[in-house]
Amino acid sequence: MTNVLVCIKRVPDVSGEVLLTEDGMSVDARHVGFTVSPHEECAVELATQVADATGGSATVLTLGPSDGVEQLRSALAVGCSSGVLVEADTDRFGPADVAAAIADVVRAREAAGDSVDLVLLGNDAADTGDFQVPVRLAYALDRPVLTNISSCEVDADRVIARGDGPDGTEIFEVPLPAVVAVLEGGVTPRYPSITGRMKAKKAPIDIQTPTVEPRGSGRVRLRVPPPRSGTVEVLGQGADAAPAVVDLLVKIGVVSA
Amino acid sequence: MIIVLVEANADGLTLFSREALTFARALGDRAGHAVQAVVFDEPTDAIRQQLGEQGVALAHHPDDPRLSDYAGASWAAAAVDVVRSSAAEIVLASGTPRGNEILAHIAARLDVRMAANVVQVESTDPLVVTRQVVGGAALEDMRLDDPIAVLSVAGHACDPQAASVAMTTEVATVSPTLDERDLVTRVMQVEQTQAEDTSALTGARVVVGAGRGAGGAEGFTDLLELTELLGGALGVSRVVTSLGWRPHSEQVGQTGSRIAPDLYIPCGISGAIQHWAGCQSAKTILAINTDPEAPMVTRAHYAVIGDLHEVVPAINKELRSRRTG
Ligand SMILES: Cc1cc2nc3c(=O)[nH]c(=O)nc-3n(C[C@H](O)[C@H](O)[C@H](O)COP(=O)(O)OP(=O)(O)OC[C@H]3O[C@@H](n4cnc5c(N)ncnc54)[C@H](O)[C@@H]3O)c2cc1C
Ligand SMILES: Nc1ncnc2c1ncn2[C@@H]1O[C@H](COP(=O)(O)O)[C@@H](O)[C@H]1O
């Protein structure tokens, strides 16, 4: 019976140009939707798999604005059974602050008799990409942590995890309770079923206010890098362009004349 | 003092580590700091030579059999020993999976801020660095004003360059203080998995890209032939891996591999920022797309407008005919 807590972050779903707010301190998300990182979608899938395999539970947590309920419901629709919303202004929270707030939630649950055996997170958040919350959370809780993990399973009181290392697939075996940061690629997130969506609507969401006083991230400002200068040279249309393409390949030296 | 944690393979220091050393030297020159290295691998002559070329006079080598199996916590513990004993002001590594992991441990142990994927130094007093966020589609200026600054350098943020004066690198062996608890996360076993090897992709001189425009798992025959004719590697968009047409190890982008080939040929890829994040370091981009307004086309150096299923076979035919000439 492994109780898993999986942490996700609501981020702007930009695919084209990034727009900034007037003060340059955040991404202007007025004209885009919201999503979570693909790494976190895989963490949610693994949380569901571990909960199912061990007869335990999967709880999904986000720290952010109240609209984060949207992302919690998406995770609840694919197998998590309850949600936690830690309502806070993410722009004021650096990775150490987020980790401290999540650690508080874990400690409070454990104090109330609900063990949190495994915390799963994404390896890096899609917007700030700090690569730190999982490790800092592990230190705050004094638990072992693995990062860059593609898949994991629980065997009794241990988590067995795999990830790609410089010399091949690395295998780890770590005693629970533990913290694991997940990368996209090892599992395929499932699509929500109709019953999943129905359940998600009714699933309980515990709304909390963090008690940590944030130190902040050190952000001075955001900027958008200048676009590549120069215009595109169109070599032609359709199959007729093939000779011009091969001429170019020769010119830049990837094909010998 | 700037401490750089370097990674090595059979050929010596990795390209990313040499980039990080060059970045550190430029920062050191501006801020008045010397650069020293921490080498976990056996400091071979090749490694010492490369460190010397980078102007490193002293390399610390934590020597303990318990470090032979990687664990982020134990390697960080050893690095923190060096940071403390050498009174370093800045700790830096390349933003590789291990680099970012060890640095996060170090930052947590020292209770200081860390900046991931730094591309530039804005100012040195106070230290303000510019780093990639939103997968590189935006930059963040971040202040690192703790007593010790921890930062990772984004891959390809600079080209590795030899120092004007080469050094003879002295290696100081250190015995780290390790706690049993730092060893529980060590690698237990390594499996060789050829199919999942991404180094062919990240190191390729030519990458042929394929996106939704490929049309299906069976739509890759011509693209694979082009890849082979050019002696390159295939890279794909996330749509392609999510639909199960190709394995994730081939994905290029924010949540896939970062590539920096001489030539990238994205075929049927729209050029979403998360994909661009992974291919923007390509020297030349030749986009093949039916849509002349696709971001990948407007940002490319060269483009062919048309159906990849017509254009790619025509290129293959032209390549074959010139080859047999
Ligand atoms: C946090 C996050 C991380 C992400 N990470 C990644 C990542 O690592 N890598 C990645 O790729 N994406 C990533 N994405 C997804 C990304 O936003 C895009 O959805 C994806 O890159 C689009 O893939 P595509 O270009 O193949 O498909 P589409 O956007 O659908 O584009 C298809 C293109 O093919 C062209 N086309 C169609 N048919 C043909 C034809 N017959 N011949 C020629 N051209 C044709 C169309 O004109 C179009 O331009 C991420 C998204 C998020 C939110
Ligand atoms: N505000 C947040 N709420 C919940 N989880 C978060 C939050 N920020 C970061 N995380 C988790 O920590 C991972 C790494 O984030 P980061 O260290 O910010 O790159 C993310 O993929 C999430 O799983």
Image (tube, coloured by chain):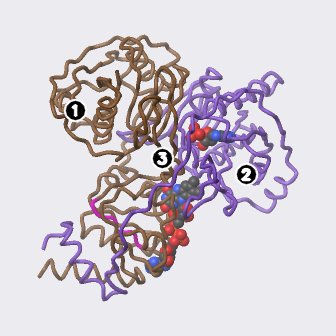
Chain colours: A purple, B brown
Q: Ligand 2 closer than 8 Å to the CB at disc 1?
A: no
Q: What residue type is labelled 3?
A: Gln
Asked whether A8 falls inside the magenta stretch, the response is no
Subunit of label 2: A
Do pointers 3 and 2 mark residues of a single chain? Answer: no
Instruction: Determine the chain carrying the residue at label 3.
Output: B
Q: Which of marks 3 and 1 is nearer the N terminus?
A: 1
Is there CB contact under 8 Å for labels 3 and 2? no
* Residue stretch rendered in magenta on the structure: B262-267
- List the single residue furthest toward the bottom: A240
> Quick check: marks 3 and 1 in contact, CB under 8 Å?
no
So how many labels did they put on this image?
3
> Which numbered circle lies on residue B132?
3
How far across and down, in percent of the image, does residue A94 sit? Answer: 62, 34
Amino acid identity at mark 2: Gln
- Look at the magenta stretch and give its main secondary structure: strand
Q: Can residue B239 be seen in this view?
A: no
Q: Is residue B264 within the magenta segment?
A: yes
In the shown orientation, is residue A102 left or right of residue A206? left
Is there CB contact under 8 Å for labels 1 and 2? Answer: no
Q: Nearer the viewer, residue B200 or A103?
A: A103
Secondary structure at badge 1 equals loop
The residue drawn where x is 63% and y is 38% is A120
Q: Where is residue A190 in the image (x, y as percent from the top left)?
A: 66, 56
Residue A173 drawn at (x, y percent):
52, 29
Disc 2: which residue: A71
Q: Comparing marks 1 and 2, which lies closer to the viewer?
A: 1
Is the residue marked by circle 2 packed among few (<14), some (14-19), or many (20+) residues within 10 Å? many
Q: What is the number of the mark on residue B54?
A: 1
Residue A256 lies, with reference to residue B184, above or below; the image says below
